[in-house]
Amino acid sequence: MTRNQLLWSLVFGTLISIIYACRGEGTSLEQDMYYTNGRDLYVKHCQNCHGEKGEGLEDLIPPLTDTTYLKANRKQLVCFLKYGMDGKITVDGREFVEKMPAHEEFTDIDLAQLIVYITNSNGNKQGMYSTKDVAIDLQNCKH
Amino acid sequence: MKLSSISSCLLFAAALSILTSCKDDRKLPIYGQRDTKSVTLADGTTKVDTVYQTIPAFSFLNQDSVYINNNTFKDKIYIADFFFTSCPSICPIMHRNMKKIYDDYKNDPQVSFLSHTIDFKYDRPYVLKKYAAKLGVDDKKWQFAYGSKEDVYKIAENSYLVSVMEDSTQKGMYVHQGWLVLVDKDKRIRGSYDGTDEKAVEQLRKDIPVLLAEYKD
């Protein structure tokens, strides 16, 4: 290998590692795209109630910052989004009973992107959730 | 006087006027229709006075099933809005923003809040009570008003200049504007702010002290 080649490969190596570093640990490009689109959907459909930082509203609307709740209900989230919620839940140590509206118009890709955003923002870090996951979890909805 | 001293004088005057204009001595506009009336003064002369549009006398049940009326807001400025408790769209953000202002003026008896429900079917006083408790504002400072469709819709459209209606396409839904209306101690509207817009709400927060300053003397 000539000196030049060595130099170039070093430069490339650095560049690639910089790009990877910017993307954050362990996230794929696909997940980043889902996250960004999911954020747009969140702003449009969810933010009025759940807040810019997922803070919720007092004891009326639950926050999305309870990482344990979101983890424990990972497979249910898609049902909540598509078919709404009714009944008592405990989030962040508090009880909530208000209804959440259904969004049956959401497509599988919308749902996947929203879930990637919600479960990877505001302190949550659950990783990728694909349209395949959506299809599987939707079959087990108890609505 | 020499030309140079005149010009420096002018410069000084200009600087002074710029400096003084920085002070926030603006006054909030008075909204609504205006009328005039002739008044006879003590010395027998007549003068023309301006009559401003005001919030007319009202009577609604509050979250404690007690009637509230204009006198509830005597010597207070208040922020009014129209909402319903099961509203999935703009109400939460309006009340999130109003709650921040409520917290700012928690200890100021001059500032109060009045939320009218437009869901005359479901939002009975006990529903409003639960809502207020969950929002953490269940006291006399923030009143939640329940009234007949006719009364509430009329005062919304005609007096607070907020458009409200039942949604013809969805059952149990209502369409309404998200204005937060600032009313002074003389029941005149002094500002209307989009309660869903952060910038507008910020403006409201700036305007409240300006309005309160009118009553300082």
Image: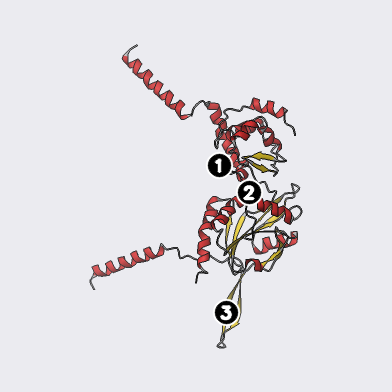
Q: Position of residue B206 (x, y in %)?
A: 50, 58
At x 59% / y 54%, what residue is drawn?
B98
**Same chain, marks 1 and 3?**
no
Q: Is residue A89 above or below residue B147?
A: above
Question: How far separated are the C-alphas under marks 1 and 3?
Answer: 54 Å
Q: Nearer the viewer, mark 3 or mark 2?
A: 2
Q: Position of residue B117 (x, y in %)?
A: 70, 56
- Tell me, for residue B48, which label it has, or none: 3
Secondary structure, mark 1, is loop
Question: How far separated are the C-alphas under marks 2 and 1?
Answer: 14 Å
Q: Is residue B212 above or below residue A90?
A: below
Q: Earlier in the sequence, mark 3 or mark 2?
A: 3
- Tell me, for residue B175, which label it has, or none: none
Which chain is disc 2 placed on?
B
Residue under pointer 2: B92
Q: Please, which residue is most extreme toward the bottom here?
A: B44
**Same chain, marks 2 and 1?**
no
Q: Which sits in the foreground, B62 or B84?
A: B62
Q: Which sits in the foreground, B100 or B198?
A: B100
Q: Image quadrant for the N terminus of chain B? A: bottom left
Residue under pointer 1: A53
Secondary structure, mark 3, is strand
